[in-house]
Image: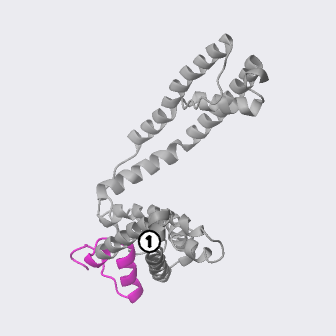
Amino acid sequence: MNPAEGRPAATGWRDRLHEVIFEADTPAGRAFDLLLIVSIIASVLAVMLDSVQSINARFGAELYAMEWFFTILFTVEYVLRLVSVARPAAYATSFFGVVDLVAFLPTYVSLLVPGAQYFLVIRILRILRIFRVLKLITYLGEAQVLMRALRASRRKIVVFLFTVMTLVVLMGSLMYLIEGEEHGFTSIPLSIYWAIVTLTTVGYGDISPETPLGQAFAVVIMIIGYAIIAVPTGIVTVELSRAARMPITTQACRHCNADGHDPDARHCKYCGEAL
């Protein structure tokens, strides 16, 4: 047993590699992830600076070299992640697996499609690993509570969204009849667009009612919009209060790559593999 972690020590080289890359409970894993986050931030800054013409004209060659350095670095890291997990395909198709792939793929695509490298700013999504790196267990636990609440309320939210879609279609169609083409409401789809903008209280102002009846109807829609905004908030709040809060660790399963296990867990609660 590893006395520092209260769990079996890694044995094979793939287990040790997985412990370093996917977990932050060891000094090596923590150092690896901190170095990774610094590299992510530096690479995103390089991409952003490269889009500034004055900076590109002066330091274009250096930024280009940095971009390829980080691309090769992230490519090697991605391969090591695939090697260290028991099911590479499952990791490759997971959220972080796709983000890790997109973190370096645009650079290679840019050899065929100029400008594709600017999509590399998606690397900033990888900074989400900071919750694991800094061992912010409280935040990890709260994130899981939020995910459970969102999953529990998804059906209610879907029903709510369909209700809103029905409302904006009716409101947009009615406003089209009230205002007509002579006041800028040239079609029902355009009127529905106005209804969405008004109901969500965005109010671009590119289209606005001009008749007294249309303006009165717009006021009603605005008031309804304020009431509607509170509905999804209330749904999620109720589910948040029901979601249980349990302490978790940063330990990840090498077989299914799931994390968020209990501190005293000996087996993965998702696939049953020994941790």
Q: Which residues are magenta?
A: 1-29
Label 1 crowd (10 A; few <14 / some 14-19 / many >=20): few
Q: Position of residue 18 (x, y in %)?
A: 40, 79
Please report the residue visible at 33 percent of the width from the left and 83 percent of the height from the top: 10
Image coloring type = one colour
| Among the 4 quarters of the image, the one containing residue 124 | bottom left
Q: Residue 124 vs residue 6: left or right?
A: right
Q: Secondary structure at mark 1?
A: helix
Look at the picture and state if 37 lies above or below 153: below
- Above or below for 75 versus 97: below
Identify the residue at image location x=37%, y=47%.
244
Count of numbered circles in the view = 1
Foreground residue among 107 and 272: 107
In this orientation, which residue lies closer to the viewer: 115 or 31? Answer: 115
Question: Where does the N terminus fall, quadrant-wise?
Answer: bottom left
Q: Residue at x 21, y 74 (%)?
A: 4
Q: Is residue 38 magenta?
A: no
Quadrant location, the C terminus = bottom left
Q: Residue furthest bottom?
A: 13
Q: Residue at x 34, y 67 (%)?
A: 265
Whole-percent x and y of residue 212?
66, 11
Q: Is 12 one of the magenta-colored residues?
A: yes
Q: Nearer the viewer, residue 50 or 154?
A: 50
The answer to whether any part of residue 258 appears in the image is: no
- Tell me which corner region of the image, top left, top right, bottom left or bottom right, holds residue 30: bottom left
Per the image, the residue denoted by label 1 is: 58
Question: Is there any visible trace of residue 8 in the rendered image?
Answer: yes
